């Protein structure tokens, strides 16, 4: 495949073109060791006739370079082919009939899908649709090395499956209660595990009880809206307190809150990874479940899930039997919880919460959904709360769905970079809108030896509405359920 520039990528220790920082330590493995054995790439054209990337969309890129300083992998490595316009060049060449090789696949695999480039692009290039279509093709047609296949099979057999997650949750809670993580860390066993397994163990949050949400919670006072809550897979299993806080805040703001039974995965993880058939199955089931709730709006409190539901119309655009229209209608009713609360305006009294918080934009909220001002307005309206902005807000923290499990090296570097930016604000706590960001940055903070309280936006609003003392809220956000488990790093 042709490259977009003849200039070689800088090596570790050299300055990168973006931000003027040094090339990350993962650069050699990511940009040099690409011709790995074990890949089987079909001969002939890179794409077949089933939903290939749209050539017209690819042609919208004018190579202006505005995307470069916002792309996490380009910032890490300074490699043109690991930038949005470099990946678009690979897609263009594939559409012109060129074959992919192992390097082409790896460059596309290494994209986090954060969509920061979509926000930065002055030409309106729909990179999200291009990379989504390309990944679906790769997932169907490329055979990766055996270790990668096994890892991907394990990840997607677990995380989009709420019942399996609940079973793992029970085992993990027992593991934590016995303090086995600290024991394994002291003995050095954790350091000898494969990197993806180390990442899974390190990222796992502290677990407490998992309360069952009522099927219907009535509005406090005059009903202003009836909403259905998507409880989520990872959110429901590992961060149930966020769902509890969401129900309380929505009810306090005049919403009847429905929690449809039998919810499964919305398909976000599968869809973002190019597992098209699986994502379609999950989407159809989610549509049926949420349609039956007959709510005015579908409320989501996990950024990745919300962005995926809003794309249901595109995902199911070719589905027969009326699915395309049903998907588009449902997508039009989807709101992030901060988006809905901002639309409604407050009626519940906010009590003072005198804390300083750094708000960390979740990529699939800020870039994919364009929801940036709403959470900031909600937080700024809390009496006594001071909102601080970290540097490089457009850069992904490295979570990116399952990226931190499939690519733990660069994900860890991005997490450390984000943690440093959060700490530099001097804030007492970090606030975000996605479980993946919570785990990723919280783990990086612990790894640096500087754990700090982390919470979801809606939990801040819940604490203010309930009148919790700031010290009590901060203590819970540091050591309560959902927080980072301290092992070798202390608070």
Image (tube, rainbow, N blue to C red):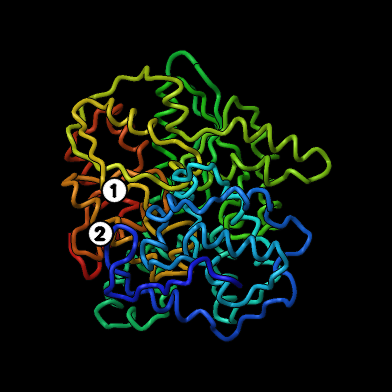
Q: Is residue 339 above or below residue 66?
A: above
Towards the viewer: 336 or 130: 130
Q: Is residue 4 above or below residue 422?
A: below
In depth, the one of 61 and 114 nearer the eye is: 61
> Residue reaching furthest top?
222
Q: To which quarter of the image does residue 474 belong?
A: top left
Report helix, strand or loop for mark 1. strand
Which percent across, then down, holds residue 236? 48, 48
- In the rendered structure, are the residues bearing label 2 and label 1 in contact, judged by CB atoms less than 8 Å apart? yes
- Residue visible at 26% across and 41% down in the picture: 389
Find residue 298 and report its horizontal and vertical position in percent: 57, 33
- Cα separation, mark 2 vs mark 1, equals 10 Å
Residue at x-position 38% and y-position 74%? 27
Residue visible at 21% across and 46% down?
475
Mark in front: 2 vs 1:
2
Picture coordinates of residue 464 (x, y %)?
A: 27, 29
The secondary structure type at the circle numbered 2 is helix
Q: Who's the residue at 19% across and 46% down the image?
A: 425
Image quarter of the N terminus: bottom right
Residue pointed to by mark 2 = 445
Location of the C terminus by quadrant is bottom left
Q: Nearer the viewer, residue 398 or 204?
A: 398
- According to the image, label 1 marks what residue? 454
| Residue 306 position within the rendered picture, expressed as x and y whole percent measured from the top left | 53, 41
């Amino acid at each position: 495949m042709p490259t977009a520039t003849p200039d070689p990528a800088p090596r570790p220790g050299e300055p990168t073109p973006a931000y003027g920082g040094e090339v990350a330590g993962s650069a050699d493995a990511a940009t040099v060791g690409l011709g790995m054995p074990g890949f089987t790439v079909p001969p002939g054209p890179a794409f077949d006739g089933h939903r290939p990337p749209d050539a017209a969309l690819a042609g919208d890129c004018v190579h202006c370079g505005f995307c470069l300083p916002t792309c996490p992998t380009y910032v890490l490595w300074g490699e043109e082919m690991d930038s949005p316009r470099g990946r678009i060049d690979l897609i263009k060449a594939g559409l012109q009939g060129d074959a992919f090789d192992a390097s082409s696949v790896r460059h596309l695999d290494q994209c986090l899908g954060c969509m920061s480039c979509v926000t930065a692009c002055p030409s309106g290039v729909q990179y999200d649709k291009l990379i989504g279509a390309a990944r679906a093709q790769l997932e169907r047609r490329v055979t990766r090395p055996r270790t990668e296949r096994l890892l991907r099979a394990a990840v997607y057999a677990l995380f989009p499956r709420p019942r399996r997650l609940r079973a793992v949750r029970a085992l993990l809670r027992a593991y934590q209660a016995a303090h086995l993580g600290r024991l394994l860390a002291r003995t050095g066993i954790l350091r000898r595990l494969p990197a993806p397994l180390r990442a899974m163990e390190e990222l796992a949050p502290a677990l407490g009880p998992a309360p069952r949400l009522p099927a219907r919670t009535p509005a406090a006072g005059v009903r202003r809206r009836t909403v259905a809550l998507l409880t989520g897979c990872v959110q429901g299993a590992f961060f149930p307190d966020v769902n509890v806080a969401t129900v309380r805040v929505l009810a306090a703001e005049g919403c009847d809150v429905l929690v449809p039974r039998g919810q499964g995965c919305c398909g976000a993880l599968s869809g973002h990874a190019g597992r098209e058939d699986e994502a379609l199955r999950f989407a159809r089931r989610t549509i049926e479940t949420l349609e039956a709730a007959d709510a005015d709006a579908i409320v989501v409190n996990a950024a990745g899930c919300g962005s995926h539901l809003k794309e249901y119309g595109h995902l199911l655009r070719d589905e027969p039997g009326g699915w395309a229209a049903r998907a588009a209608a449902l997508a039009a009713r989807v709101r992030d919880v901060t988006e809905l609360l901002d639309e409604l305006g407050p009626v519940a009294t906010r009590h003072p919460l005198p804390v300083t918080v750094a708000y960390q934009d979740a990529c699939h909220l800020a870039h994919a959904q364009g929801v940036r001002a709403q959470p900031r307005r909600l937080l700024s309206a809390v009496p006594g709360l001071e909102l601080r902005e970290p540097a490089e807000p457009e850069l992904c923290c490295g979570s990116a769905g399952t990226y931190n499990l499939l690519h733990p090296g660069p994900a860890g570097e991005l997490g450390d970079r984000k943690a440093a930016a959060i700490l530099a604000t001097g804030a007492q706590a970090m606030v975000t809108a996605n479980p993946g960001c919570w785990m990723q940055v919280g783990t990086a903070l612990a790894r640096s030896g500087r754990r700090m309280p982390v919470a979801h936006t809606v939990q801040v609003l819940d604490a203010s509405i309930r009148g919790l003392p700031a010290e009590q809220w901060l203590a819970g956000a540091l050591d309560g359920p959902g927080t980072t488990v301290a092992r070798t790093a202390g608070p």
